[in-house]
Amino acid sequence: PEWVNGSVMNYWIKHPTHGATGLIRDAFLWMSTIAPLNIAMTWGALCIELLLCLIVFVDRIRLRALALYSGFFLHLGIIVLHGLWSFSFIMIGLLLFYVPRVQVELDNNNYKL
């Protein structure tokens, strides 16, 4: 039920070892009191991770770019919220290798995918 109602974010924000500190903790605790925002933070992280695991099967450059940027900002958020620098940098680096490369050729001022 913690994932369904979004309360899992409260647990991670308040976690004694990996939780947020100082003003960041206060800001995220305040955001977690707003139910729609709390649910969006919880389910947003899950949806981004699901998008990342399915992106290898997608051939559209815009969806791949969306996955790359979403994963990038998710892991930047992990740095801000949890202070896990090394984990986040490793994951961002792996994203650059994981999201399939796309070659875009310019042909008569139109992009071909």
Image: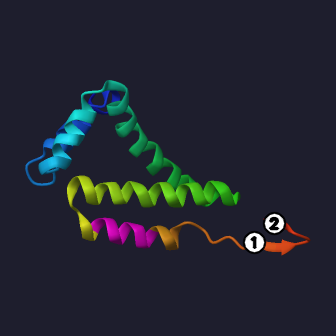
**What span is in magenta?**
87-94
Q: Nearer the viewer, residue 1 or 107?
A: 107
Percent from the top left, x then y, of residue 41? Answer: 36, 39
Q: Name the residue under label 1.
A: 104
Percent from the top left, x then y, of residue 68? Answer: 52, 61
Left or right: where 75 falls relative to 12: right
Q: Which residue is drawn at 35% across and 71% down?
A: 90
Residue placed furthest toward the right: 108
Q: Residue at x 25, y 67 (%)?
A: 85
State yes or no: discs 1 and 2 in contact (Cβ < 8 Å): yes
Q: Residue at x 40, y 34 (%)?
A: 40
Percent from the top left, x then y, of residue 15? Answer: 12, 46
Residue placed furthest toward the front: 23
The image quarter in which residue 3 lies: top left
Where 112 falls versus 46 (above or below)? below
The image quarter in which residue 8 lies: top left
Q: Tell me if mark 2 has few (under 14), some (14-19) or many (20+) residues whose alpha carbon lies within 10 angstroms of its own.
A: few
Where 53 falls versus 107 (above or below)? above
Residue 71 shows which numbered tag? none
Magenta stretch: includes residue 20 = no
The image quarter in which residue 37 lies: top left
Secondary structure found at label 1: loop
**Amino acid under disc 2:** Tyr
- Which image quadrant: the C terminus? bottom right
Q: Mark 2 points at which residue?
A: 111
Q: Which of 76 and 42 is in front in this view?
A: 76
Which one is earlier in the sequence, the residue at label 1 or at label 2? 1
Count the marks. 2
